[in-house]
Each structure stands twice: as structure tokens, then as C-alpha cells.
Image: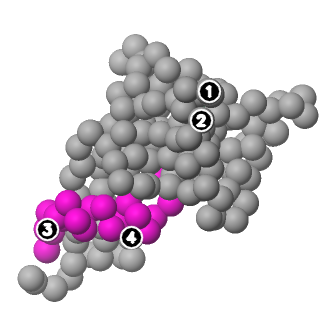
Amino acid sequence: MIFEMTERECRDLLGRTSLGRLACSQDNQPYVIPIYFAFDFDYAYSVSTLGQKIEWMRANPKVCVEVDEIADRSDWRSVVVLGTYQELTEPQYADERSHARSLLEKRSLWWQNALGERQLKSETELIQTTFFRIHVDSMTGLRATAESR
Ligand SMILES: Cc1cc2nc3c(=O)[nH]c(=O)nc-3n(C[C@H](O)[C@H](O)[C@H](O)COP(=O)(O)OP(=O)(O)OC[C@H]3O[C@@H](n4cnc5c(N)ncnc54)[C@H](O)[C@@H]3O)c2cc1C
């Protein structure tokens, strides 16, 4: 059985998961990558190094985020968020940036995936990072269960 999730159920899932898939696009070409987020009210906060996804989201801020919990083929939940990219630049977004940092810091080694991947490609020790958030414009959720309601 597959059910639509309520908004409350969607928000609960967004609140307890941290890994999502972020999709952006440019010139009719979609691009999806795994990334850690911290959801808080109507925003998903994250930190990133500068690369293709940031360049693309700057050019086209309309994005999609998918998160899920999959126990097995008949027991899963998935939420799809349509949203808008916003870069937390200083000094304009200093408060939001520090809020993002405090949310992300709750997860140990929160910076590791963003920086680790870049170190692989970069020859310099100095790696620029940026905080950003995705405003949740709309969301839908589906859950599957082996039992009937
Ligand atoms: C579990 C997990 C958590 C992560 N969390 C974060 C995070 O919080 N913040 C963050 O910035 N990054 C995170 N990453 C890394 C992220 O998925 C990207 O690899 C990274 O951010 C670089 O993206 P970019 O668009 O800047 O790529 P660029 O460095 O500009 O790369 C260009 C090309 O490299 C290839 N590429 C890039 N990333 C990947 C990938 N993941 N898999 C396969 N090919 C790829 C693509 O073909 C792309 O066109 C995480 C990865 C994993 C697996």
C-alpha cells in the first residue's frame, strides 16, 4: 500500500534525515548529487565548496531536493521538495549563516564531505566554502507499507 504523507509527516522526515539528493539544472541539463542538509522550518541549510552545483544554482535558483528512509522494498518513505536556492553571503546573511553553522555543527564532522571531495581535486590547501539554504516552496511525500491502513 502506498499513501500520501501529510505535511506534518513530511516535515518530520525532513527533520530527522540529514542526507538528501540535490537536483539543479542548467540549459536543460539536470544534475543530481548527494549532500548533507539540516532542515529547519521552511529551509534546508547546507555548506559546500565552490563547484558545478553552486555555479548552476547561482544561474538557476530553482532546485529539487529528495530525502528518503528505505527499510525495504515495501517499507519506505520519500519526500520531494521543490525549492529556491539562496546563498548566505556575508555581511547580508551573517545571522542566517551562523544559524546554518549551528544547525550543521550538531552533526560531528559536518564539514568533512564537502571538503574531502574538494581536496581530492584541488592542489591548493586553501579551499573556499559557502553556506546556502533552500527555501521549501512546496513538498510532497509518499510512504509505502506492507499492511493496509
Ligand atoms: C554522503 C555524502 C555527503 C556529502 N555531503 C556534502 C556536503 O554536505 N556538502 C558538499 O559540498 N558536498 C557533499 N558531498 C559531495 C557532493 O556529492 C559533491 O561530490 C561535491 O559537493 C562536489 O559537487 P560539485 O557540483 O561542486 O562538483 P565539481 O567538483 O564541480 O565536479 C564536477 C563533476 O564531478 C562529478 N561529480 C561531482 N560530485 C560527484 C559525486 N558525488 N558523485 C559522482 N560524480 C560527481 C560530476 O560529473 C560533475 O560534473 C557529499 C557526498 C556524499 C557521498
Q: Amino acid at mark 2?
A: Ala
- The residue depicted at 59 percent of the width and 35 percent of the height is 94
Q: Quick check: 6 left or right of 49?
A: left
Q: Quadrant of residue 72?
A: bottom left
As helix, strand or loop, the secondary structure at mark 1 comes to: loop
Q: Position of residue 102 (x, y in %)?
A: 61, 55
Disc 3 crowd rating (10 Å Cα; few below 14, some 14-19, many 20+) is few
Query: In the rendered view, would you say 134 is above or below 51?
Result: below
Mark 3 or mark 1: whose residue is earlier in sequence: 3
Which of the labelled discs sits on residue 3, or is there none? 3
Q: Are marks 4 and 1 in contact (CB under 8 Å)?
A: no
Mark 4 to mark 1: distance in Å? Answer: 40 Å
Q: What residue is disc 1 on? A: 91
Label 1 – label 2 distance at C-alpha: 5 Å
Q: Is residue 5 visible?
A: yes
Give the CA separation, mark 4 to mark 2: 36 Å
How many discs appear?
Answer: 4
CA separation in Å, label 3 and label 1: 44 Å
User: Helix, strand, or loop for circle 2?
Assistant: helix
Q: Going 40% across and 14% down the picture, which residue do you hit?
A: 27
CB of mark 1 within 8 Å of CB of mark 2?
Answer: yes
Which residue is under mark 2? 94
